[in-house]
Structures are given as C-alpha cells and as structure tokens.
Image: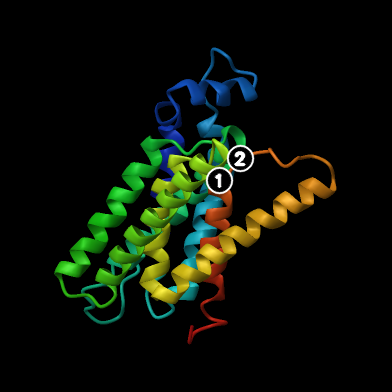
Amino acid sequence: MLLTSALTALLIGLALPWCVNDEAGMRLLRLHGRPHGRVPGRRLLRVMLPIGLALGYLASACLLPDRDTVTGAAAHADPGAFGLAGVLGLVAGASGWLFWIDVRIHRLPDRIVLPLAGACAVLTARDWAAGVPGARTALLGGLVLLLALFLLALLGLFLRGGGMGLGDVKLGFPLGLVAAWISPAHVFLAVVLMHVSAVLVVVSALVRRRAHRGTRIAFGPHMLVGLWATILLVPVLPEL
C-alpha cells in the first residue's frame, strides 16, 4: 500500500501542471506569484509525498493490520489482498494534493478526481468479480454517496443560487467507496464527520469575523477530513 501511495503522490506532483491546465490552474499560478511559470508541483512533493506515505501507513494500520504494509498482501493467498489495499493507497496518495488544491482555488481538478474514481472502481469491480466479500457493498456505497452529494448540489443551487461543486460530487464516489469497504454504517459516519468539520470551520470563521453568511467554503478538504477521521476511528469503533 505504501508503494501505491508514494507512486500516486509522485505522479500527481509530476503531472500537476497538466492536471490544473485551465483557468482555475492559472489562478493557482497567480497565487504563487508565477503568472507565466509552472505550478510548483515538484517543490511540493517534499510535503505531499510524506503525507501520502503517512496516510497510507495509517490506513494500513487501521484497516489491514494483518497484511504487509507495502503491498497489502496477506500471509495467505487472499484474492482481495490487493483490491482494498490498492484503493486505500490511491486515495492516500491523492488526498494531500486534493486538499491543498481545493483550499487554494476552491476546485477539485477532473484530471485528478476522475482517474482516481475510475481506478478505484476498476480495482473494486475486479474484487467483486473475484467474489471478494465487501466489494459489491463498496461500489454501492460509492454510488450512493455520489448520488446523495449530487442531490445536495442541486438543492443548494435551487435554494441559494449556488451550492456544492461538481468536483465535490465526483470525489464522493471514491471516498464513499472506501468508507463502504469498512461497512455501510461508516459511510454515514464519514458524511457526518465531513459536515461537522465544515461547520466547525465556518463557526470559527464567523466568530473571528473572517466570514459572513454568504461566504463559500471549499468542501473537498472537509470530505477528506471526514473520511480519514472515519478510518482512524475504526479501531475505536470496531462494531459500528
């Protein structure tokens, strides 16, 4: 799993100029004082690579305690040894980048989110075809969270003239898939923790008068916080 986390973080860092090669990416360049330069992906690798490795290790320790930390392989021939481990490695490696980009420009690039979602779907579908327990539930969990966030985005658009971005909706699939690998109840827990994280940040900003009622926040980082908090709580709430 650590190898997958490291490779994912590395590839995103090396391909970051391509990943954000649009108007939003130009905003990212301007924020770093580089209107005609390159997105500083390689420089940020010194931060994002350790973050990906740390998250991969935490996920392995919480969800795959009996498997090899690097490969995710069990000591015996387990047909699902690489499925969940691969999904966790991909999400761990991408989490730091997605968090940073969304905080900076309030956008989750399709060129990161869609390949991430597709790779997670393929790995999980392979396990479902192989009869691995939990794979079908994981796919359904990802689709359910995707649909739920899409409906929330439509509701927000209808009620306030704005709402959750489509990048958040798309990110819901791999995050819901990971949570559902644990159990359907953990999908609900992850959603609750996502919104708790967002509410705490908004209330803090309002108290410090750094925001007002119409202020929009990047929800992607809170989605990632909710998922990883859920993973960390698995050893504490094993019967959830």
Image location (x, y in percent) of residue 100: 58, 41
CA separation, marks 2 and 1? Answer: 6 Å
Tag count in the figure?
2
Image location (x, y in percent) of residue 111: 37, 35
**Quick one: 94 or 41, which is closer to the camera?**
94
- Amino acid identity at mark 2: Val
Q: Is residue 93 above or below residue 108?
A: below
**Quick one: 166 or 35, which is closer to the camera?**
166
Residue placed under numbered mark 1 in the picture? 99
**Local crowd at mark 1 within 10 Å, few (<14), some, or many (≥20)?**
many
Residue placed under numbered mark 2 in the picture? 103
Q: Is residue 137 above or below residue 225?
A: below
- Amino acid identity at mark 1: Phe
**Local crowd at mark 2 within 10 Å, few (<14), some, or many (≥20)?**
some
Image location (x, y in percent) of residue 123: 25, 59
Q: Is residue 181 above or below residue 8?
A: below
The residue furthest top is 36
SS of the residue under disc 1: helix
The colour scheme applied to this rendered structure is rainbow
Give the left or right position of residue 173, taking residue 226 as reference. left
Give the left or right position of residue 94, taking residue 181 as reference. right
Where does the N terminus fall, quadrant-wise?
bottom left
For the residues bearing labels 2 and 1, Cβ distance under 8 angstroms: yes
The residue furthest front is 159
The residue furthest left is 129
Give the left or right position of residue 7, taking residue 100 as reference. left
* Residue at position x 40%, y 61% in the image: 176
The residue furthest bottom is 239
